[in-house]
Structure formats: C-alpha cells, structure tokens
Image (cartoon, rainbow, N blue to C red):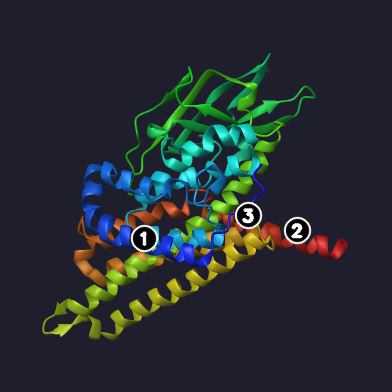
Amino acid sequence: MYNGNPHVPADVFVDVLDQVRAFVRQHVVPREVEIMRGDQIPSDLRTRAADMGLFGYALPQEWGGLGLDLVQDVELAMELGYTSLSLRSMFGTNNGIAGQVLVGFGTEAQCKRWLPGLAAGGIVASFALTEQGAGSDPSGLRTTASREGDEWVLNGAKRFITNAPDAGLFVTFARVTSTGGGSDIAVFLVPANTAGVEVGPHDSKMGQEGSRTADVTFTGVRVSAEALVGTEPNAGYRAAMTSLARGRIHLAALAVGAAQRAHDESVRYASSAKQGSASIGDFQLVQAMLADQRTDLTAGRALVRDAARTYVSGEDIRIAPSVAKLFCTEMVGRVADLAVQVHGGTGYMRETPVERIYRDVRLMRLYEGTSEIQRLIIGGGLVAAERRRIST
C-alpha cells in the first residue's frame, strides 16, 4: 500500500494547471464535433494527453505519476470538465476508481507491475464492478471467485464497464465464499488477454460519445494467487467504497467544469443573439436564467473545494463526497437545461455545444452511485453519527 505524500508544490501545480487549461481550450474544444461524430478521441489528442502525464496525474510520483492530491485533482477536473467528458474518461479510470484501488490496497509487487504502465498511458485499466443486479450497491455482486490450489477461478458478467474495449487490465470485483459459509467481496487484477475474458461490442449511449463502455464476461478465468489485491479477500468491499468515495468528489468537480462551459456558452449567446432589434441578453427573464446558472455554479465550485479539503485531511471521507456528487451532478443538469432554454431552438440542434453538454451530463447522476444512493449515504451517515455521539 502506498503511504507517501502525493502533494505537488503549488508553483509546479500552477504550471500543470495552465498547461491543461491550454490543452483543453486550444486543442480539444475546437474538435468536439469531430469527437462526437467519430465516437472516439483522435489518436493525436491521446498521444498529447499521455505526453502531458494525464494518464497518471493522480498516481504517485514513485510509480511515474504526477502525484496530485485530491485538492489539486479537483482543480484539474474542473478544467477537464470544460470540454467533451469523453476526454477525461479516456484516462479517468487509470487515475481514479481503478488506479486508486492499486494505490490504496495493492502490494508493492502489484504496484510495481502495473502503476508505471498506467501512469504512462501504455496500459488502460477498467473498474469492473457494475453488474446487472449490482450497480450503485456492490453488495449484490454475483460474479464469483473460487480458490483452486494456487489459482483463483472467476465466473460472472459485468456491464457498462468504462474503457473495456481498450483495457489492458480489469480491476475485477467478485464474491468469494468462505469455508464458514459466509462471503466476502474481493478484488482481482485480471489482464485483458487472460483466457476466458470476453469484451462485448461498445455500447451506444445517449451522450459522451468517444467514451467507450461495454459488457465484460468472465468464464472460467484463472488468475494466480498474486492477482488478489491485498492479503485477504475481504479487502474488496472496502477498496470499492474508498475508491468510489474519492471518485465522487472528482466527478463533482467535472460537473462544475461542464456547468462553467454551459454558462459561458449561455452568456455568450445571450450577449450576441437578437430577438427583433433587441439583444436577448437585455430581457430580464433571460438575465434571470443566467443568474440562476451562476449561483448554482458558484455554490458547486465552493462545495467541491471544501469536500476535497476535508477528504484529504481525513475530516470527512464518507458524507462530504456524497454531498458534493449529489449537489454538483444535479446542479449541472439544471445549468445545462437552462443553457438550452437560453439558446431557444438553436440549443436543440445537434452539434450546438449546449445540446451535447445537455446529453453528456445526464449520465453524471447515474454512474459511481446514483443521486438516490447518495441521499441514502448522507442521511444514513448523519443518523449513525448522531447515534454514536449519544452512545459515547
């Protein structure tokens, strides 16, 4: 397990942030329609992202990453959210839910084997948790892992797995039955070329074109004992919850970035478009929509930064991530909806930026824990904390 300090000096981080902002706005934003039409990130943008270290910005420096902590991560995410969310998705699992399982729970040997490749972009990792009956709540997992001598044998099916068509490694969650009749959720490192691993065709989605998801099946997949993350099978559930909690703050920051773009497009359009001889930006009801956007956006940005700070300090690693994800992903939906409204009929036309944003951000209320699950985590956590306080 990695126990180092990933924090990057402020002056270095400012330079990193400036480079990412320039990359996003000068090189990616002008090609958003190309990404949408082709349903893929152009290879030259992928190469540029890898050269910039974006496949490993949140991975430890000792394994080739940039070593950003979560406070810095969210600032970067707000820049990445400004353009097609599929760009960030290309390297998001390496830095986030998949890579962080290795950083937080992997052995020294496992980190040495996989993290340098993830950080360099030579290997893409997928987080293989979601199933037909187990999405936001992993306790319903049906994929199984059984011990046979020095090997584990995995059987089951996953769905909606991000980057599955391009993955070199599946960070795979499975249920292990113990000798006492109970069961634990374990996590395994499964190379994509292992016999019995099959990736289905990539899904056709409402939005986020360029982000490739697919079903993955495991049929009699045999991996060595060293493929088990950690030393005990019961580490899997904690690894999933820890990785998802961190990822929820990152997603909240992405939502802020997307909301900023939708707001900027709205202000720009309102300032230039005319109704008759008048600019629509002079209409008070249009101004009210812009004001609501800015208010939501400002609140979301402050919330994300506070959630990242309390997570890094250890003050709140459970409720704050869910609060941030719930508010910010719902917020960006409201901001995107208002953006379409400000644009009128133009906002409903394909290839208009706000039309794409409207479709892209709808997924944010679903993945890595739905809004409903976040409400349960927040409410349940508050009640449990109060009961602990009373009992002590």
Residue depicted at 58% across the width and 53% down the height: 246
Q: Secondary structure at mark 3?
A: loop
Quadrant for residue 331, please give it: bottom left
What residue is pinned by disc 1?
19
* Disc 1 to disc 3: CB gap under 8 Å: no
| 90 w.r.t. 385: above or below | above
Which one is earlier in the sequence, the residue at label 3 or at label 2? 3
Q: Nearer the viewer, residue 128 or 159?
A: 128
What residue is pinned by disc 2?
384
* Disc 1 to disc 2: CB gap under 8 Å: no
Q: Nearer the viewer, residue 286 or 70?
A: 70
Judge the density around disc 2: few (<14), some (14-19), many (≥20) Cα neighbours within 10 Å: few
Which one is earlier in the sequence, the residue at label 1 or at label 3? 3
Estimate the x, y position of residue 299 in percent, counting from the top left. Answer: 49, 73
Q: Rounded to the nearest whole Å, what is the CA distance between mark 1 and mark 2?
A: 44 Å
Three-letter code for the amino acid on which mark 1 is drawn: Gln
Estimate the x, y position of residue 325 in percent, counting from the top left. Answer: 52, 59
What residue is pinned by disc 3?
5
Quadrant for residue 201, please give it: top left
Three-letter code for the amino acid on which mark 2 is drawn: Ala
